[in-house]
Image: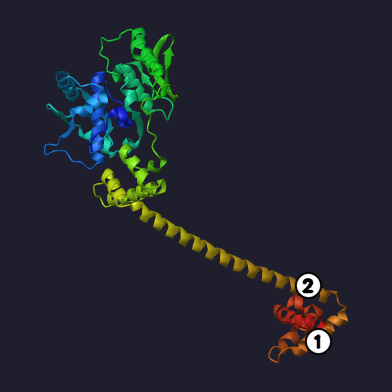
Amino acid sequence: MAEKSVKNTQSVLKTPQSIVHIKHTISLRQYKYWVLLLRFYREFFEANETPDEKGFYSVPTAKITEYLGYEPVKAELKTDFEALRKEPIIINFLDKDGKKAQWGMGFISEWKITSKTIAFKIPSFLEGVMRGDDKEAKIFQLLNWNIFNSFNGKYEAIIYKLCKDYIGVGRTPYMTIDEYREYIGLKENEYILFKKLSIWTITNPIKAINKNEISDIQVSVEYTRTGRKVDGLYFTVKEKKQTSLPFPEFEPNPAFSLAKVFISIENQTKYLEEMPPEEIEATIKRANEYGESLKIKGQKVQMGGIYTKAFAEHWGIQYLAQQKADQAEAIKKIEAGKKLETEAEKEKALKQAERGKVEKMLANFEALPDSEKAELIEKYISTVVDVIRPTVQRAYKKYGINAHKESPQFKGLFTSFLKGVERVNN
């Protein structure tokens, strides 16, 4: 797909925090080239485009010209790319056995420059980060290229990018002064006095960021001291309203929030035009489930390609239909449960009412004179079937007019008799 002019499109880079914490020993111009190469690599990956037979990805020199706003000098371009190849990145990590290890690489692995194209390879570690292979690489912040490219100083660009990665936290991690010097790529003989270090690599860059009309963050620095000596620092950061917005920041739609790898702005815009947000979210959920099923089987998972296929085949429609069916089934079960519960409540109420009637009848019986009680009991005994009459008579002989209190069998049959009497009397 042909790249639109930077002047006519919203250009948002997505840079993982995993690759922020490196020594910035390269120049500002080289740093900008590197950020662009990472962007181009991710675009190739998300579009399922493969490198050439030697593993190179190629971009037109004109494309870099559009982003920079000027045509790079060929001699400088070669020097800068060679610097990116030679300058080291040292990554501290835990190996599979849990022991600490280090991983060394260049900013890029190889490069080729022709009259019209730039070809490059990036180290395997960075490939993994950009593909989202590592858990920590799934944490991303959006970096507006046009703001980043507006900085003319290396240190303001470094501080801006670092602070953007921690905008959600509100502050950057603490660094000792030696760690900060190493982080921004200073040599041992540069800015030895803290006063000069502070002015040229901290205070002035912060002022440049805060005064920049299109900068979208406000930055300040906090120092820790031992007496008058400054031991370390961290930056605090908050969002601010830009006074000039020639290139508005792209706001990702919440429907894409569950994506495990970045979906390009162009594709986000395309999908939003083609389908409602709920279908987009459903498509991503279904694609994530499919990716997890492949991972469980031990197969290689490329989420960028899975998302492309999922959107092309409208997996979200099927997911929503299944979700609707599942919800209907769940509602059906709930309603059936409620029906059973209602029937059980009705049956319980009937039993309680029946017990109330029995208790009332027995209370009425208890209120009668003993002679009338005896008369009713004798009448009751005369109605009992011959098979159980002896049992009832023995209970009456033993307990008298209180037989219903002492003999459950007597009570059960006697209450049935009283019901019949009550119906006759009523």
Per the image, the residue denoted by label 2 is 360
Q: In terms of sequence position, does the residue under pointer 1 or pointer 2 come before the other?
A: 2
- In the picture, measured across the screen, residue 122 lies left or right of residue 139, that is left
Residue 72's spot in the image, x, y percent? Answer: 19, 21
Residue 177's spot in the image, x, y percent? Answer: 35, 16
Q: Residue furthest front?
A: 8
Q: How many numbered badges does the structure rendering display?
A: 2
Tags 1 and 2 touching, CB below 8 Å:
no
Residue 378: numbered disc: 1
Query: Which corner quadrant of the image does residue 190 belong to?
Result: top left
User: Which type of secondary structure does the marked residue at label 1 adopt?
Assistant: helix
Residue at image coords 22%, 25%: 65
Q: Is residue 182 visible?
A: yes
Please name the amino acid that badge 2 sits on: Lys
Q: Is residue 104 visible?
A: no
Query: Which corner quadrant of the image does residue 265 belong to?
Result: top left
Q: Nearer the viewer, mark 1 or mark 2?
A: 2
Q: Nearer the viewer, residue 426 or 304?
A: 304
